[in-house]
Amino acid sequence: MEKSSETSWADQWDYNPDPIHEPKKTRGSGSGSGANYKQKVGEGFVKTKAVASSGVKKVKEGTSLGFHWIKNKYQKTTQKH
């Protein structure tokens, strides 16, 4: 695709000036905000791990109960009295 010297549709109909992007200003050395971020991520990871662990336990228990139920139903149909 060749670049043309014509203006684009957005340039033709956009009457607002283009925004000026200024670089972000940093505060101090910046190490404090990174430490806080890491701490929050770490706390979130611990919570997520705990929820996932309890979910896995529930799935294991449910699966085990399901297999036992199926096994009992099968044994009841195959027993002859």
Image (cartoon, rainbow, N blue to C red):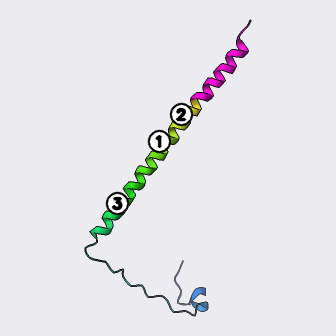
Label 3: which secondary element: helix
Does residue 59 appear left or right of residue 74 in this picture? Answer: left
The circle on residue 38 is 3
Q: CA distance from mark 3 to mark 1?
A: 22 Å
Q: Write the residue at 59% across / 86% down.
A: 10
Tell me the magenta residue range.
64-81
Q: Nearer the viewer, residue 56 or 9?
A: 56
Q: CA distance from mark 2 to mark 3?
A: 32 Å
| Pointer 3 with pointer 1, Cβ within 8 A | no
- In the image as oriented, which residue stretches furthest toward the left? 29
How packed mark 3 is, by other alpha carbons closer than 10 Å (few <14, some 14-19, many 20 or more), is: few
Q: Label 3 is placed on what type of residue?
A: Lys
Q: Write the residue at 29% across / 68% down.
A: 32
Q: Earlier in the sequence, mark 3 or mark 1?
A: 3
The circle on residue 53 is 1
The circle on residue 5 is none
| Pointer 2 with pointer 3, Cβ within 8 A | no
Where does the image place residue 22, in percent across and percent down from the top left?
Answer: 39, 85
